[in-house]
Amino acid sequence: MAPDPPVILTLGLLLAAGKTRLWLLTIPTLWCLASGATAWVLGYWPGLLMPILALAACVVAVLGNRSKHY
């Protein structure tokens, strides 16, 4: 019925877990991209926040994993 909030929760939990395995972000990120594409086609502009959040989560995960190595 409303899969977007659990996807955002999943991204947040993966980031809160500390060192995130990047492959775990693939399915939530793909869902955010699909949700953003649907919002784009329907003209629902607040729905474009989903891909932005996914991109931000991926950037934070990559930067967080890089800083742990040093």
Image: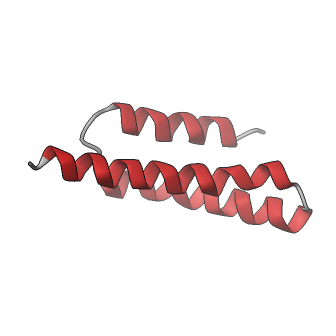
* 55 left or right of 14 in image: right
The percent position of residue 68, horizontal first and vertical second, equals: 16, 44
Could you tell me residue 61's position as x and y percent?
A: 35, 49
Identify whether 9 is placed above or below 24: above
Q: Could you tell me which residue is drawn at 41 percent across and 55 percent down?
A: 59
Q: How has the structure been colored for display? A: secondary structure
Q: Give the image location of residue 29, x and y in percent.
A: 53, 56
Question: Between 44 and 21, which is closer to the camera in this rendering?
Answer: 44
The answer to whether residue 18 is left or right of residue 54 is: left
Count of residue discs: 0
Viewer-closest of 38 and 49:
49
The residue positioned 45% from the left and 59% from the top of the image is 26
Q: Residue furthest right?
A: 43
Residue ID at (86%, 68%): 41
7 vs 31: above or below: above
* Relative to 7, residue 56 above or below: below
Q: In screen coordinates, is 70 left or right of 10?
A: left
The image quarter containing residue 3 is: top right
Rendered residue at 63%/62% (across/down): 33
**Where does residue 1 sit, x and y in percent of width and height?**
78, 39
Residue 8, quarter of the rendered image: top right
